């Protein structure tokens, strides 16, 4: 029995320890000790703890500490977990403004832009919770329909259940689309100060263009220590894999 109690308490104790480290990092950040805050947050990462708040705070700490590339990287990771978070998106834009490369974004068809904005307007976790709540409420409405005596209540419960189920299913579709979007769009941040992009995965290949640290690129392939990247305008090339860190 005692052993079982210990096993049950382990997740709680681990959460408490993580929370304490997180608060320690926040306290150091508030005092202006950004290096100390980064150390506390990185300790959580080494323990396997990840969250939007942790990545967001790491981005802020690195930004304040003068390391814009690390800031971009962690803001991007926070954005990936919660693409609709306004604070994350604003700070990410500020960090991007300090990067050397200003890449033009392609013009999207308005329906594509609308769908992507809707799909990325909420966190995956938020969509999952919302869909569960909708299904629970719909189930409650159906129970009300089965046991209600009044015809008006029966009609309201029936149509309410249909609407709630439809909203729940739509939330699942959004969550699935968002998950597929990030799984199919692998991205990385350049970490080397200056990177010469090659036409092929070889040092002897033709030089195409130069990128700088903090720039985000899409990953389209890998080959023996090289990574094939793609820019928003469709331009592709190869860089050494260690020159970038996947988000």
Image (tube, rainbow, N blue to C red):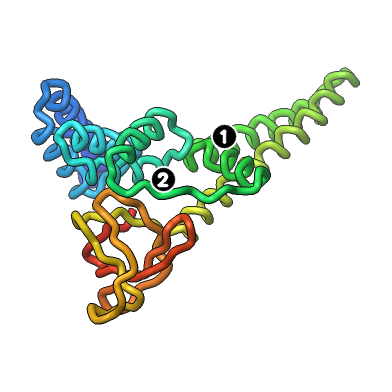
Q: Which disc number belongs to residue 80?
A: 2
Q: Quadrant of the N terminus?
A: top left
Q: Position of residue 103 (x, y in %)?
A: 40, 49
Left/right placement of residue 94 relative to residue 115 reads left
Give the residue at x 24% y 62%: 195
Front residue (pair 30, 125): 30
Left/right placement of residue 59 relative to residue 170 reads left
Q: Most extreme residue toward the right, as rendered?
A: 151
Local SS, label 1: helix
Q: Position of residue 132 (x, y in %)?
A: 58, 38
Local SS, label 2: helix
Sequence-earlier tag: 1 or 2: 2
**What residue is pinned by disc 1?**
130
Mark 1 surroundings: few (<14), some (14-19) or many (≥20) residues within 10 A? some
Relative to 161, is 107 above or below?
Answer: below
Q: Position of residue 20 (x, y in %)?
A: 18, 30
Are the residues at dot 1 and dot 2 in contact (C-beta closer than 8 Å)? no
Spatial CA distance of label 1 from label 2 is 19 Å
Give the residue at x 29% y 40%: 55
Front residue (pair 154, 147): 154
Is residue 5 something that shows in the picture? no
Relative to 52, is 244 above or below?
Answer: below
């Amino acid at each position: 029995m005692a052993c079982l109690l210990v096993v049950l308490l382990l997740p709680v104790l681990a959460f408490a320890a993580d929370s304490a480290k997180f608060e320690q990092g926040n306290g150091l950040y508030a005092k202006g000790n950004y290096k100390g805050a980064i150390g506390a947050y990185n300790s959580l990462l080494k323990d396997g703890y990840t969250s939007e708040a942790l990545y967001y705070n790491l981005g802020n700490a690195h930004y304040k500490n003068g390391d814009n590339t690390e800031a971009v990287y962690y803001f991007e990771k926070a954005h990936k977990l919660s693409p609709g978070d306004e604070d994350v998106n604003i700070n990410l834009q500020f960090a991007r403004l300090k990067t050397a490369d200003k890449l033009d974004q392609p013009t999207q068809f308005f329906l594509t832009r609308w769908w992507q904005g809707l799909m990325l307007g909420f966190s995956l976790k938020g969509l999952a919770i919302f869909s569960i709540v909708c299904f629970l409420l719909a189930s409650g409405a159906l129970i009300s329909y089965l046991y209600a005596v009044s015809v008006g209540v029966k009609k309201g419960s029936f149509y309410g259940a249909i609407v709630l189920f439809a909203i729940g299913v739509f939330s699942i579709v959004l969550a699935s689309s968002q998950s597929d979007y990030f799984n199919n769009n692998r991205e990385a941040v350049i970490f080397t100060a200056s990177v010469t992009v090659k036409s092929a995965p070889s040092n002897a290949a033709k030089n195409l263009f130069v990128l700088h640290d903090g720039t985000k690129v899409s990953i389209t392939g890998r080959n023996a220590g090289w990574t094939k990247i793609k820019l928003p305008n469709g331009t592709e090339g190869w860089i050494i894999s260690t020159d970038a860190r996947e988000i």
